[in-house]
Structures are given as structure tokens and as C-alpha cells.
Amino acid sequence: MCNADIATAAAAGKGSSFPVTPGHEVAGAIAEIGDQVEGWAVGDRVAVGWFGGSCGHCVYCRAGDVVHCAERKVPGLSYPGGWAQSITVPADALARIPDGLDLFDAAPFGCAGVSTFNAVRKAGICAGGRVAVFGIGGLGHLAVQFAAKLGYETIAVARGGDREQLARDLGAHHYIDSDTHAPGAALKELGGADLIVYTASSTAPVDELLTGLNVHGQLTLVGVDAGSVIVPAAQLVMNGHTLTGHLTGSARETEEVMEFAVTNGVRPMVERMPLEKAGEAVTRLRSGAPRFRIVLDTATGGE
């Protein structure tokens, strides 16, 4: 379950139609395949994430940038999602789950995992650089692990001191409590960040946080709300800063992040709840209580 599922489950937007089946972090085994599908077999363990298929012929698809296809599909929005006993998806949305990763750990890699992994590895930060992760939740707890395992000096930024030990256990070398310190200023005191991966849902702190970037530093938005980001233009220009956003990853990139996770011991922190309690799970998710991903179990006894 992802925070984006809350809005899907509410079905309050214009154009909403019923029934609604949310869920875009899905893992399971193939039960049936279409007549024209090649390369997959019944029984294969697969995951499906926010990328749920593309047109295959637009300029973005032809360039390999399938996540920016104008006709990109999203499970739960474009077709019934994964909060169900079964789901039918386009074959190009399938990511093969490697040995050594169970279904409950695999599911979050289709959205939270691939999004944060790509945000870190595609930033082009030099080896030994300094990466800060703002927000330690469903996205951030994975981003901290990826940054540390990729060899960066990793700084975790979150509200309150109660998450410091957890952040350090995940691999963070430093922790900043944003309740007691202005995070941008605190980052500057630590030498500045070459990359800030922003995983919080509110964009309000972005302005101050940019002051913690080094020259030529980059802030990548992964978690967002409906708000706007207002920053001093001179600050961006004079320091060569980059403010950018990152969406998700392709099915192949989801395979890559799962393979990296198996090799390097990265795992999501999940809470299992039965599918029958999906409503309770949404309430729990809305309250911010889970640490850090709820995975709905479709079968008593698990995998």
C-alpha cells in the first residue's frame, strides 16, 4: 500500500467510476498468460508497480523512456489494481522477482523501491559524495539504504529524535532532527549535500532545504503534494543548483532494484495485513502509523 492509494480508494475525483480496486505495488505468481505473450510462463514470480504498461510506439517508448509515455498505464487507475486475489496486466509491466526475495518484500520495490533507487543512482553523484534523504517513511527508509549501499555518505533528515537510531540502523551516517534544527543549515554545517532526495509529502520545506546543497548540488523531488515550490532564482543560478523531479521506473529497472536489494541486503520494512482488512489498512495508512509499508496478504498463512 502506497500513500497514493488513499486517493484512489476514496474514489472522490472527477471521472471516478466503480468498482474501484486500488493497488500498484503488487507481487505474485503468473496464473495465466495470453496467447500472444512470449517469455513468461505460468508459475513465474513477478511484480508490477506504478508502471503498468505503455503504448510501445511513441517517441518516449522508442527511446526506452516508457515511464513518460502519454498513454502509460497505472494499476488501480488504468485498470483494476492489486488489492484483489488476482490482477490482469499487460505483459510489458511484468518484472521478474529474483530468488532470495519473497513476495512481501518484492511488492514495494515496484513503486517505492524503484523510485528512490533511480533517484539516487541516476543523479550522477561522484563516488564518496554526500547524499541526504529528507523524510524517513515508506520512500525514505529505502532511499537511506540505497544511498548507503551505493557508497555515499548518507544523511537522514526527519522530524523528531525517535527515528535517529532507526535511520542509523538503515545505514545513515548522520541524522538531523528537523524539529530542532533548520535542515538546510544543518546540512551546510555537515559540509553540504551533493544530492537531496526529497521523499516527504509536503513541499513547504524545499526553499530552506536548498540552502544545504553544495555548489552544483541537486534536489530531487520524489514525494510531492498538490502545492508549489517557490525558490529564489538567484540562489539556483549563483550556485548552479538543480531542482528536479523523479517519477518511477520501468519494469526492467524494477528488476534491477530487486537484484540490487538481494545482493546488498536492502529490504523494505513491512507490516502484513489480510486483504479482508484493506479498509482498516487505509485508515492506518492515513494516520501515518505504519512502519513503513503495509502489504495486503491475499492468502491466510502468507506466500
Image (tube, rainbow, N blue to C red):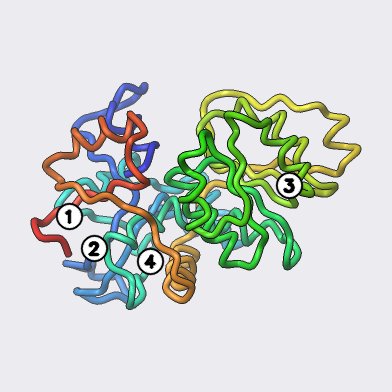
Mark 4 or mark 3, whichever is nearer to me: 3
Q: Which residue is mark 4?
A: 95
Q: What's the CA distance linking mark 3 and mark 1?
A: 40 Å
Residue 274 at x, y percent in the picture: 14, 47
Q: Which residue is mark 1?
A: 86
* Vertical position of residue 249 compared to residue 2: above or below: below
| Quadrant placement of the C terminus | bottom left
Looking at the picture, which amino acid does disc 4 mark? Ala
For the point 66% across and 62% down, the residue is 152
Mark 3 or mark 2, whichever is nearer to me: 3
Mark 1 or mark 2, whichever is nearer to me: 2
Say whether marks 4 and 2 touch (CB < 8 Å).
no
For the point 45% across and 56% down, the residue is 113
Looking at the picture, which amino acid does disc 2 mark? Gly
Residue 20 at x, y percent in the picture: 23, 35
Say whether marks 3 and 2 touch (CB < 8 Å).
no
Q: Which residue is mark 2?
A: 28
The 10 Å Cα crowd at callout 2, few under 14, some 14 to 19, many 20 or more, is many
* Vertical position of residue 122 compared to residue 39: above or below: above
Q: What's the CA distance linking mark 4 and mark 3?
A: 29 Å
Q: What's the CA distance linking mark 3 and mark 2?
A: 36 Å
Mark closer to the chain start, 4 or 1: 1
| Quadrant placement of the N terminus | top left
Q: Which residue is mark 3?
A: 218
Classify mark 4: helix, strand or loop.
strand
Q: What's the CA distance linking mark 4 and mark 2?
A: 11 Å
Q: What's the CA distance linking mark 4 and mark 1?
A: 16 Å
Quadrant hosting residue 262: bottom left
